Amino acid sequence: MYRYDTYDQALVDARVADFGDQVARRLSGEMSEDQFKPLRLMNGLYLQLHAYMLRVAIPYGTLDSRQMRMLGSIARDYDRGYGHFTTRQNLQFNWIKLEDTPEILARLATVEMHAIQTSGNCIRNISSDQYAGAAADEVGDPRPWAELLRQWSSFHPEFSYLPRKFKIAVIGAEQDRAAIQLHDIGLQMRRDDAGELGFRVLVGGGMGRTPMIGSVIRDFIPAADLLSYVEACLRVYNRYGRRDNIYKARIKILVHELGAPEYARQVEEEWAHVKTLGLDPPQAEYDRIAAQFAPPAFAEGLPTEIDRSDAGFAHWVDQNTAAHKAAGYAIVTVSLKPTGGIPGDATADQIDLIADLAERYSFDEIRITHSQNVVLPHVQQQDLRAIWDALVAAGLATANLDLVTDIIACPGLDYCSLANARSIPVAQKITERFADPDRQRDIGELKLKISGCINACGHHHAGHIGILGVDRKGEENYQLSFGGSAAEDTSIAKIIGPGFSEDGVVDAVEKAVETYRGLREPGERFLDTYRRVGLQPFKAAIYG
Amino acid sequence: MKILTGQNLASGDVVWWTGSGWSLHLFDAVDVGETGAAIAATEEKALRVNVPYVIDAVQTADGPMPAHIKDRIRAAGPTVHPAFAIHPEIPILKTPARHQSNADAPSEVKAN
């Protein structure tokens, strides 16, 4: 894991001091809300429906037990005992008091964490593959590059007031677990024919009210040129992105209006200039960062046999663990999606437990997923049973990764001041409807995603089944869409017809699932069957 | 009727104008008629409330009830955490009057 150097720490400490002063001036009335709002947003502090909400950055979703315990202690001491993991691999506290925020940020700074650039029209938290450094299928570990981008983008003077917010994702594997095609910039590590390391560069993806899939503007940029090339991408956007209309300000609109080839041409032209500025770091600096992501000392000759005599444990192993690149190890996903629960919520005690498990069993590493779950990336297979026992005791052993109850849901109208409808109650009802584990496993992979407004924080556009809550004459109404994906087969879901009430949409989901079960061919997921047969059979079953 | 709401500056708690101060309880709210904007300006300047705004409501047997579901949830607390609810008895889904949008309600920049 990357550890702050003196520069990193000084920057964060200075920002904590600045914000403490700004909060004091706001509380004394020296500063108005209009003056204060952009400052608090730069520090991740929103004023939401019931309270202030603080969004804490978890760079590329990676943290250690010390940081995780700090999140737990803040949940306990300043929130109401919960943390909420988000679709940006961050964590939100929903019940924060303004007067406490300087103290909270000071405590976060002691463990090399902050809330900087978790809001505002800047480059947000860089996201990545939660299996980075552990996945059996990766070309290389994307985290050193994500860290390089984090340092480059933090307080970048030219990109602190972009036309709109900007999200970058980096992966190092063929399998896309970070939705790179739905980011402003998506970067995929690869090697060229000569074996040189570089990146495929996609630009202009995104969800929100105008979902678009990113375009490949360069199939290979050498790794040594990554920063200057990304800088050129941002420069063209910063210069020509629309500032007159918030709904057309994202880079996806610029790329769409120019056309990807023309945007790419302008980037190349800009890059020819940027490349001369000496922006790309020397190899020694990259090596300094990469050294901190060196693989842990994996043991050799570990047993790989697992006692599967307990059916519950065996199901959990099958569903919630993934292949590790080191023999005898596994990647564990801790589901935060219990039946009837709030997707992404964890209590302070659960957060502490995960920290303990990471420290004891996973080389002190934890990852947060954009699907609002938590990963222990390096677990010996012989320790899986002990981990499962601990998770069972803490209510964290739900064996539903990528199944119909592993739902992404935004906070919705229960917490968010932008939402038009509640998301969480719909998720809860669906998990209760499909609570039977055997039924879930029979249905197989089905990614269901719920947003409470068109901003799409719940990624409904990318759901095999997507649900969008809207306001229809003052009442909640839910639009259903099918066929989305955020993986390497990225697609945007299509609305299937008129919307439903809260209970109606749960019934409609069940009808869709049963239609799929009746139509599927061997090995087909819901998404595969939908793509093969089209909407009509589903529509007939749902609308009659 | 029109009622005045906002949030406490330091805590962020949702508050309602009672005619003489601010309450955490919706049912303490009073009809501000056409005086809401003036009260809001005075109270905000005195730091007794943050981001105040006037909403439409109807008088019910229990007390004033916001016309829009968003403000009913603000008054009740999150519907998914009964322990955090202030007024769980508020009928969130029951629209007490014809819907009118609350265009003046403040909102943050896009959330996530």
Image: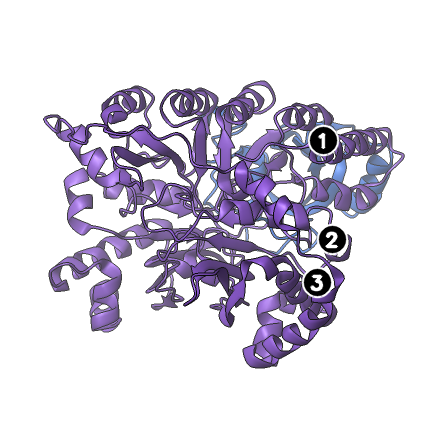
Chain colours: A purple, B blue
| Residue identified by numbered label 2 | A160
Amino acid carrying label 1: it is Thr
Q: Which mark is residue A488?
A: none
| Chain letter of the residue beneath label 3 in the structure image | A
Tell me the quarter of the picture where residue B57 sits.
top right
Indicate the quadrant containing the C terminus of chain A: top left, top right, bottom left or bottom right. bottom left
* Pointer 3 with pointer 2, Cβ within 8 A: no
Q: Is residue B90 visible?
A: no
State the image coordinates of residue A1 (x, y, percent, origin top left).
Answer: 52, 34
| Residue identified by numbered label 3 | A163
* Dot placed on the residue nearer the N-terminal end, 1 or 3: 1
Q: Is residue A86 visible?
A: yes
Above or below residue A103? Residue B109 is below
Q: Which mark is residue A6?
A: 1
Q: Are marks 1 and 3 on the same chain?
A: yes
* Pointer 1 with pointer 3, Cβ within 8 A: no
Q: Nearer the viewer, residue A313 or B35?
A: A313
Q: Nearer the viewer, mark 1 or mark 3?
A: 1
